[in-house]
Image (cartoon, coloured by chain):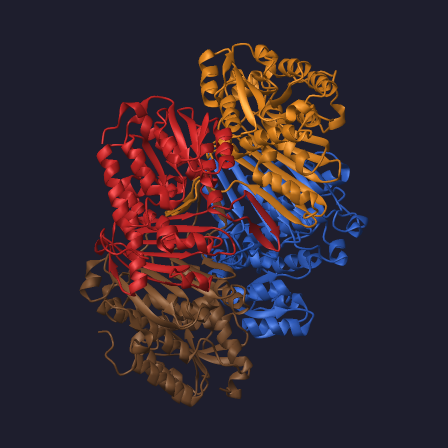
Chain colours: A brown, B red, C blue, D orange
């Protein structure tokens, strides 16, 4: 895909669609980049939109994100609206010829995701999906080392992802379930560092809150992965860790091992009863630099006329993998990832 | 089980059966204990027997371990002979009324293991099986903390066990396979820290050496565990890690997380191109203190008239779990641990 | 000091004086703050000024910083020009009633520093000096813990500060020497965490580059500190560390110990020949968050009408301490900090 | 010095003089070595002597260490009696032609130390002084790396040594003071890793317990070292650290940095309120392996006919350095190490 020259001029003019926490965060990233300029912010809550606009020095706010998409000054959009609106906004932005950065997921539905990604590709607009971990200094370096052959043949993968506390039930009802909403970050990293997965076997239940089980979701899961390339993998997730935010990833191969493990949150060791240090409490702390780096990368891709990564294929394939885990958990059997095809029933 | 008063007198008189590396190691542990005295060493290789006898100040050596067992001065035996001889020697020692410490496993065969453990229990002799990790300061403290409720409800377990390099094919042929020979340590720790396992799903193949596959064994495995108590577990093993010996165990619960991870091997940080430190290269390095502690514990159990732990039940149940993993791998399906019963075919 | 209401309105309008690396960095910090607006950038190099103006969306650039100071729209200035110009610009800004953030030092000369700080205080303008380490999450938390009494009585202090490589000889000639230019950060932290120093004994010489010795400076120093409160301290500095940027600080007291030590630069552990991790290579990496935090704090102080910290007194006293070390090294004797008074000869 | 052939035969027959904690510890080390045999134990407390004799399978006990020295079967002695008796026992053992391992110090008095060391050298008996840290895996490897040139030119040294709690006042009264009794280990390591020291400047006082000050001793000290080779050093000591036993040593050079820092005591990370781990509480924990290694080295030196290290020269020079620190503290001035000569007044 060759990109339109319009995106390579500077500064690129952005609209931020959605003025919640991530809108503020991505706004902060954009104002630090001289190659970018935020010209519009859209949010139904005027006050929120104004807040991001003040931060980003954006000249105007919209209550309807479609208006921002169709603002002729806007060349690129950052979509951080509620998940259920992503697909329609991507479609509109693609049809309007705008470059698109969208928080994951495109949709909880594979058919819808594939449909919208096809539109993006047909329209030839740059599209980047928000798997921010790929831009963390540790994960990015791990991939480079693996590609450089430092691990030899990758043989085993292990990932743990735990949040400090579950989101609200209301949020969870529309989330697509733990694999789509939370584990997808670990699954995407599995694909990023090791490659595509052939088959999954997932177990899980509601240990944290029975109400999560009552809505058909799980809050504690473990999945066994068989990668296409032969590697073996495991992914463990929980919606609640009393000690904070817990992401650990290990890749093992014939040539060594890489471990992505959060450093202490603060460069401070306390010696008293034993030795203790601070731990990250939330994903925003742990991955703040990664969030900024993914936005900087999006701008750099646009400026260089390069195809953004991760793009439509990653949006689709990481979703497919998460859906395979969901199905395995629901049906109590190993599921081949290729079984999961658009048009089939999606998890309720 | 009340123990015979003879074991509670001091010093307890030991015979070491088998004068290889572990015979030397356990001999070194015994000579550091004033409550123990090594009076005999048995090994078909006279030179090896003499070496351990010199170290332990043992007065006599035997070429046949049965002669040491029947030496009337000997009250307790340390069995570190080749695995295939364990069952017969345990049986002979039990019948002779001797206290028994035996390296794992009793046998690769569940029926034989159960048969011999029954004899041990009928004879009422103290018996301890060599799962040394339970005596590592980290694992032991972890169990105490878990029993004390520090983790609340245990929800997830994760263990990794990797050796620096595979043993010889000759050894492997008689080893019972990777789950019985290597992963059993991680599986025993799963039982030690979390409890019994209900069902396992194992995958694995020969990635390190095709010859290992040709003898029907695997060298790289991943198993998914469902614990009876509801926790989820994973265990990953490999016969080869270029960076050394790799044992990591994590237990996660509603109240926190414990991680058993080797500290740097040497208290030395080197700052040059980055920061680097030494890593353990072999199990003997990593668990040297644990090997000594398990022998000290055995002596202390005998002196106190207490039942040694881990004992016959752990020998049987950790084997059963390893056999369940083996069967799951061979048959490509989840296997309930209770399926594995003596009398059934054992893995070839 | 009560601050003028004009600084508490939002956004506060800034000029950045100096468009080098620190101008860019502080500009990036300011654009992330909705309560701040950069309206002008001054630098004799037009291209540099334009670069920072683009980043900060500043409307105008000046070649002369005095013009920016006298720009009626400008309420506050960030002074990151060459050190020799600091005093005059502070004086001009104070006389113009502008709030002032200035990189350390005010001047290499105590008399000049005191004179200018007096003007600042007489004019009643807010003034903050750029000791950014105080805003590092680790150092800031350490101080809070010490103030809260967690260490009991502080008894020993130890700090190490090493740069990857010495600056140019040209720079060093105007730097005031290693204690004023480099060690002052460690000395300021000594004051921040422990309190004022009574007497210093410093040794040092040129081990890295003889040319540094030839200009009368040292590149490797060690100083012994006696604090007014009775604590004992040491500070070691070097202008060259092949492994990168090395800052470590330890405070020990009757109640425990706090260690400020950089975490690994990247959350990645590499297992191969031993275990290795990345180390920080430059102060900008290590203290990037601290640089942003100090600017955010300056804006917050202004908005809240509070007196910025560290202010004139810290600018004077940390300089006095650095001068005492310089004199001790030059004269080969312990020097009482109170000996160093304005009007006396300053180091050539 | 060529050693007598009698020491190179196996097993070497030892007497342990002193059956306290260190007698037990060294006894445990000796029984693990097949090349050594403990034949006698001496202690005025018969029960203590018997305890070590049981552990070591020694055939006889003496109440008077001189009797053990003159036991014709005894070839080598381990002197772990109270410090004030060391010199006389060394002298007797040397005159009796026995190989000698003696805990530090030989004597608190330099003249006496030199006198006895001369006798040892004249008699040509092997002599090793108990600076066990040299045998810690980290310190030993550090020295090898420094000798191999890995650090280039050593430029800075920093050591911290803190005990959990001060010994009794009675003990302290006969200890020779903090530099001779405690800091001497850090000072010996300074010599081991960097080389001889030219001049010291020490400060210190009694912060932990005023009674320590009243007997003319200090409990908290900091010393500045100038090494003969040009390196700069600092050593900080305290008699009390609430968090346990604290030894950290750093050597910095033109080629990098080595840090000797205790690993966590237990391979267990606890995630709850932050992350915490165990810390060493006493020197015996931290240096247990080093104590065993120094005894194994002594036996190996004897067996190989090699001159033990550290020997008489280290006993004298590390003492001289400690005395220089003591004098500097007492006289409040820098002291050249060469000033400290036998015949001069020693610290009261």
Is residue B325 or residue A315 the one in the foreground?
B325
Where in the figure is residue A179, as x and y percent of width and height?
A: 31, 68
Where in the figure is residue A251, as x and y percent of width and height?
A: 45, 62
**Left or right, B114 with reference to D304:** left
Vertical comparison of D343 with C180: above or below: above
User: Splitting the image into 4 quarters, where does residue B308 fall?
Assistant: top left
Vertical comparison of A128 with D213: above or below: below
Residue drawn 34% across and 83% down?
A114
Is residue C248 or residue B145 the one in the foreground?
B145
Where in the figure is residue C42, as x and y percent of width and height?
A: 64, 68
Is residue B245 or residue C183 the one in the foreground?
B245
Where in the figure is residue C260, as x and y percent of width and height?
A: 53, 46
Q: What is the residue that sits farthest to the left in this orientation?
A: A214
Quadrant into which the C terminus of chain A falls: bottom left
> In the rendered image, is residue C308 in sight?
no
Vertical comparison of A226 with C261: above or below: below
Residue drawn 53% across and 65% down?
A145
Vertical comparison of C287 with D209: above or below: below
> In the rendered image, is residue B288 in sight?
yes
Residue drawn 58% across and 72% down?
C53
């Amino acid at each position: 895909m060759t990109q339109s020259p319009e995106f390579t001029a500077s500064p690129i003019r952005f609209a931020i669609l959605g003025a919640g926490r991530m809108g503020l965060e991505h706004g902060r990233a954009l104002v630090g980049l001289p190659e970018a300029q935020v010209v519009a912010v859209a949010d139904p809550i005027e006050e929120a939109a104004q807040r991001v606009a003040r931060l980003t020095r954006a000249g105007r706010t919209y209550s309807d994100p479609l208006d921002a998409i169709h603002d002729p000054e806007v060349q690129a959009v950052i979509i951080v609206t509620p998940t259920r609106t992503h697909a329609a906004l991507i479609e509109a932005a693609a049809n309007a010829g705008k470059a698109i950065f969208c928080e994951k997921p495109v949709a909880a539905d594979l058919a819808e995701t594939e449909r919208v990604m096809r539109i993006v590709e047909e329209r030839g607009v740059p599209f980047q999906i928000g798997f921010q971990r790929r831009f963390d200094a540790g994960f990015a370096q791990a991939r480079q080392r693996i590609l450089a052959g430092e691990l030899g043949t990758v043989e085993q993968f292990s990932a743990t992802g735990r949040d400090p506390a579950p989101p609200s039930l209301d949020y969870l009802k529309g989330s697509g379930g733990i694999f789509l909403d939370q584990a997808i970050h670990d699954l995407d990293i599995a694909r990023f560092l090791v490659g595509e997965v052939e088959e999954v076997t997932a177990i899980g239940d509601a240990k944290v809150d029975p109400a999560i089980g009552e809505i058909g979701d799980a809050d504690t899961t473990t999945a066994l992965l068989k990668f296409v390339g032969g590697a073996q993998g495991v992914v463990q997730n929980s919606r609640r860790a009393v000690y904070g935010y817990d992401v650990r990833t290990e890749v093992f191969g014939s040539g060594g091992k890489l471990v992505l493990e959060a450093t202490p949150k603060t460069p401070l060791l306390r010696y008293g009863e034993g030795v203790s240090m601070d731990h990250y409490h939330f994903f925003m702390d742990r991955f703040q630099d990664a969030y900024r780096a993914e936005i900087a990368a999006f701008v750099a891709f646009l400026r260089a006329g390069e195809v953004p990564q991760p793009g439509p294929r990653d949006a689709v394939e990481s979703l497919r993998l998460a859906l395979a885990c969901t199905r395995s958990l629901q049906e109590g059997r190993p599921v081949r990832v290729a079984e999961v095809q658009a048009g089939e029933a999606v998890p309720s």
